[in-house]
Image (cartoon, helix red, strand yellow):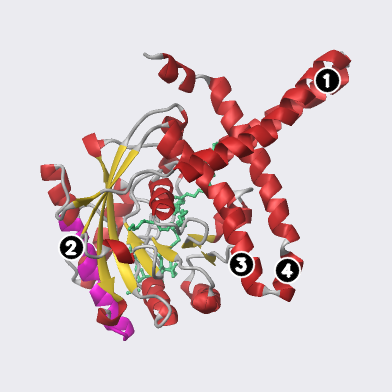
Amino acid sequence: MGLGECLKSQVLCHVLIGYVFLASGLLINLLQLCTLPVWWLNKSLARRINCRLGYCISSQSVAILDWWSGTECTLYTDPKMYPLYGNENGIVVLNHQFEIDFMCGWSFCDRFGVLGSAKVLVKKELAYVPVIGWMWYFLEIVFCKRKWEEDRITVSQSLQKLRDYPENFWFLLFCEGTRFTAKKHQISMEVAEKKGLPKLKHHLLPRTKGFWLTIQNLRGTVAAVYDSTLNFRNNESPSLSGILSGKKYHADLYVRRIPLESIPEGEAECAAWLHKLYQEKDGFQEQYIQTGRYPGPIVSTPRRLGPLINWLCWSALVLFPLGAFLVSLLSSGSTLTILASLAFCYGASLLLRWMIGQTEISRSSGYGNKVNSSS
Ligand SMILES: CC/C=C\C/C=C\C/C=C\C/C=C\C/C=C\C/C=C\CCC(=O)SCCNC(=O)CCNC(=O)[C@H](O)C(C)(C)COP(=O)(O)OP(=O)(O)OC[C@H]1O[C@@H](n2cnc3c(N)ncnc32)[C@H](O)[C@@H]1OP(=O)(O)O
Ligand SMILES: CCCCCCCC/C=C\CCCCCCCC(=O)OC[C@@H](O)COP(=O)(O)O
């Protein structure tokens, strides 16, 4: 093990990374709160400021992925479509199988200049996660309860608000609605059988209503669907803990650009279209597992320096006061203050551990573990 690898595996490094993320993130959340008056004066300006502030948070996770762990993200796509990526609004449809899929997604967003404005249809539970969940309020992220009767109204309203968004954005949809587990797969294939749909080997049966709603509300605003299929080399199951320990993974992403005009408008037709898309995605995953490659050429999208510089700047900003505080704490010699500080650190580490737990599939929700009542 080299010196760098040894350093990256040290718990102290993870504690410091966690501290930088939490301290800077909460500070940025506070700055986001301060932009509220700007919303009333100039909504477009407030949105642009929040994109930059959001970038300061999400690009830290990109820095940890791209620069700390050195994970490589390779893009397979049609080179003729490449110039459009980042220069138009897109709906990204991605498989939901890996604990760090959102980090890889963000890394690609950064490479195409849309990280600050990236959007997602996300479960409401994540809105309460400090830093990331709180940041999402100000970025107008669309929350859902995975209860169609409520979501059909609230999701529609949130999507309508994106129609005059001042920056190019990608809207991410995990149509499977939850992360892949063997049990959820088995149940969803029972649903597929009842519906007379072909079985999928590598995906859960997609939930079609959110997709239809998104297409319906963003038609005229979004130019294309980016059908994206992600996998990792060597059959690896990457984790955030692995990334923090400096483990290098290799992600491969296959993207097809599908013009929005080619997607049917009616609900039933749109649902059938999405089911067919997932059958194709399943074929791409099978090909990847058999050959180690996706169809189509590789297009070079190097990692960018922006996230590293941002991370180093925020680290400097919040680590210096921490150092000064520790020095004054030790020199004060007050047992009570030292104990209170230790208790605070313990609380912060529990919070961080809980946040990392949100990414773990073993702690995944029970959603999809049984057949939904509306079926
Ligand atoms: C060039 C590079 C390109 C790309 C780069 C890649 C990406 C970068 C892009 C952006 C990055 C941005 C941000 C990323 C950051 C963080 C994101 C992290 C994670 C958050 C993700 C989540 O939270 S996923 C969970 C939330 N999202 C969803 O659920 C979306 C999908 N769901 C839906 O659309 C649902 O329809 C719904 C949520 C709108 C409503 O939910 P409900 O449960 O009420 O579902 P339905 O009404 O659809 O369910 C009933 C129908 O489902 C059938 N059914 C019943 N049981 C099952 C079962 N077990 N499995 C499957 N299907 C089932 C049932 O028969 C009903 O069928 P109908 O025919 O009647 O519809
Ligand atoms: C500590 C160092 C900082 C590293 C930077 C990364 C920060 C990560 C911290 C907190 C993460 C909070 C947001 C995580 C969003 C991803 C979780 C996710 O993928 O959600 C799952 C959801 O789709 C479906 O949920 P279920 O499978 O039904 O349950």
Q: Residue at x 68, y 39 (%)?
A: 23
* Mark pair 1, 4: CA separation: 38 Å
Instruction: Tell which circle, 1 or 4, labels the residue nearer the N-terminal end.
Output: 4
Dot 4 amino acid type: Val
Instruction: Look at the numbered disc 2 and give the secondary structure of its residue.
Output: helix
Work out whether residue 271 can be spotted: yes
**Quadrant of the drawing holding the C terminus:** bottom left
Instruction: Look at the numbered disc 4 and give the secondary structure of its residue.
Output: helix
Instruction: Tell which circle, 3 or 4, labels the residue nearer the N-terminal end.
Output: 4
Crowd band around label 1 with a 10 angstrom C-alpha radius: few (<14), some (14–19), many (20+) = few
Task: Give how far across and how far down residue 141 sits, in percent.
Answer: 54, 64
Q: Which residues are magenta?
A: 264-283
Q: Does the beta carbon of the residue at mark 1 sit less than 8 Å from ligand 2? A: no
Instruction: Look at the numbered disc 1 and give the secondary structure of its residue.
Output: helix
Residue 328: assigned label: 1
Dot 3 amino acid type: Arg
Q: Is residue 272 magenta?
A: yes
Q: Is residue 110 magenta?
A: no
Instruction: Look at the numbered disc 3 and give the secondary structure of its residue.
Output: helix
1 and 3 marks in contact (CB < 8 Å): no
* Mark pair 1, 2: CA separation: 61 Å
Which residue carries the number 3 mark?
A: 47
Task: Give how far across and how far down residue 292 sits, in percent.
Answer: 15, 42
Q: Residue at x 48, y 60 (%)?
A: 118
4 and 2 marks in contact (CB < 8 Å): no
Dot 2 amino acid type: Glu
Which residue carries the number 4 mark?
A: 38
